[in-house]
Amino acid sequence: MRRTLLAASLSALLCSSLAAQAADRVLSIGGSVTEIIYALGAGDRLIARDTTSTYPEAANDLPDVGYIRALSPEGVLSVDPDLIISEAGAGPVETLEVLTRAEIPFVEVPDGFDGAGILAKVAAVGTALELEEEAAELAEDLRTGLDAVAAKTASLPESERKRVLFILSTRGGRIMASGTHTAADGIIRMAGGINALSDFEGYKLMTDEAISRAAPEVILMMDRGGDHGAPDAELLALPAIVTTPAAKTKSVVRMNGLYLLGFGPRTADAAMDLARALYEGL
Amino acid sequence: MVALSEPSPHNLTDQARPLDRRILARRLSVLLVGLLAIAVVVNLALGASDISLWGALGKFLSGEELTTLERVVLWDIRLPRIILCVLVGAALAVSGAVMQGLFRNPLADPGLVGVGAGAGLGAIISIVLGGLLPVGLQSLFGSYVTPVAAFVGGWGSTLVLYRVSTRGGRTSVATMLLAGIALGALAGAVSGILVYMADDQQLRDLTFWSMGSLAGATWEKSMIAGPVILLAIAGSTWLAHGLNCLALGEAAAAHMGIPVQRMKNAAIFSVAAATGVAVAATGGIGFVGIVVPHVLRLATGPDHGTLLPNAALLGGALLLGADLISRTIIAPAELPIGIVTAVLGAPVFLWILLKRRGLVDQ
């Protein structure tokens, strides 16, 4: 810890044009940040991750410092990072204060639920890791993928666009669904769909009638595996949903949560998969 | 006098005579001070990061400079956390004992004076609506918005309950109990409305708040909570004699020269102050207020003169133990301490109930 600080300050003193020693004990907080770090080929510099970082498989072998909003100061210090890269919203404030006192660089990556947001994340992570070139290459790849999806979906006539309802959970028959300004809203737009619920922000518990009135043609859910997600038959039989067009055509799409909502390197693929699931023959 | 010469833990639970019990209680106090001291050292030495307490202590004594990691972990993280933990554990346990004495009900806990419900509501309001505060106020309170709101909520609801149940200068504890249920339901309903309005990140914050945690312990929090809790605990020892007399009934206590109403006021407001600060600093931590006084009553009897100080010691030591588990069991992540106290406390409580049903049924 002290040695790296010393090295950092020494090199800064010696020659400002000489690249400072890049961080090689990186703690990544947030699933999309971790994915970007691996995509930049810097996975070997990671020493720990947070609970939401579950992709790629190798990330699961790293120590888990807990949930992004409830980080424990000593837990974070114990993995001895020399750089922390985090999605927006890490906390609590007390932990961040301790990290400042311990003189550990903390980089917060901006959030954004569209293509530009992903590219901005990649650029920010690249800068933090001093991998600007690799980041530019990755951004170029991702831009190609994102543009491809955008081109495909742009050809859809307005009248054929499907109304999609994203359901976060159906615990006890009560439906928690997504309004605007969420990752779910973002991916539905990218895939050429229309969010069936656009009159509120964030995720909310919905009344049965509101869902019925929203008349979704497709229901989108996270594929959680196990017994968490209600099976399709059960889902479509819920009073809120049974009257909707989606129930008549039995249109339920399930995708992995981090893949679908992560807004990282795989999002162009996820948007394309979703678009293909929404529109046959796309 | 066999029990005196052999003060082993097994004898503590035996039906000793009152005189024996008082001596036993004193010995128990000494034991608990020792336990607390051990718990403090263990919590200072163990944690997620593998720095050596002894190494750091050696350096400190020989005037050598500590590394940044040693200084931050020991001085900025563990020490304030230990202090806050002991304070909160003591506050919850003593408040529980006082409430049980005041309500003459073994199931009473600080929640009965509305602190829990009110503090919870305050916390929810600050988390969900905190963004609506004027910017000036936001920067004034900074990260203390939620603790301050929880404290104000806890005190506010205690004041309302006190007003409702006090008529003609007399507080009816029965009315207070029932009004507390009503107020709890009301706070629950308002919380429900706010939860409905909350976004998913605020919901996560709320969930974590309600499970309690000492991870946010800082020197400032310990320094704010310390005087309030210590005063409340010191004040409650003054209540001990009154609470003992109250066990015979309010009328009997009054005949014995106890200023019953003044004592009730003191008890209610010291509990509200101590638990209000504790809940504000750490969120919801359950079961300490019930389990600690019960264990001690079984061991050394119901005399509040010894029960209250021992409850403070055992509460502090117990919460340190729970926090040690919370900090280390899934390191480097942390398990909310409310989960630990409930997982440990609930079975112990059930076991006590099964073993000593007679004590509760009396």
Image (spheres, helix red, strand yellow):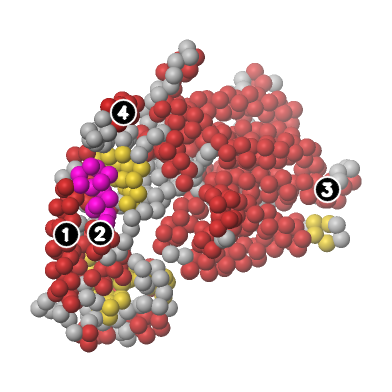
Cα–Cα gap, marks 3 and 2: 64 Å
Question: Which of pointers 4 and 1 indicates the residue nearer the eye?
Answer: 4
Using the image, tell me which numbered label, if any, was put on residue A13.
4
Above-or-below relation of B42 to B311: above
The three-letter amino acid code for the residue at tag 3 is Arg
Task: Give amino acid for label 1.
Answer: Leu
Eye-nearest disc, 4 or 2? 4
| Chain on which label 3 sits | B
Between marks 3 and 4 in the image, the one whose residue lies nearer the viewer? 4
- Are both tags, 4 and 1, on one chain? yes
Cα–Cα span, label 4 and label 1: 37 Å
Task: Give x and y (percent) for residue B257.
Answer: 89, 43
- Residue position marked by numbered label 1 in the rendering: A142
Q: Quadrant of residue B67?
A: top left
Queried whether the magenta region covers residue B69, the answer comes back as no
Q: Is residue A127 visible?
A: yes
Residue position for label 2: A118
Q: Secondary structure at mark 2?
A: helix
Residue B89 on image: x %, y %? 58, 39
In the visual, does B282 lie left or right of B163? left
* Residue at screen point 36% across, 43% down: A106
Circle 2 chain: A
Identity, as a three-letter code, of the amino acid under mark 4: Leu
A125 inside magenta stretch = yes
Cα–Cα gap, marks 4 and 2: 35 Å
- Residue B35 visible in the snapshot: no
Callout 4 crowding tier (Cα within 10 Å): few <14, some 14–19, many ≥20? few
Read off the magenta span. A120-132
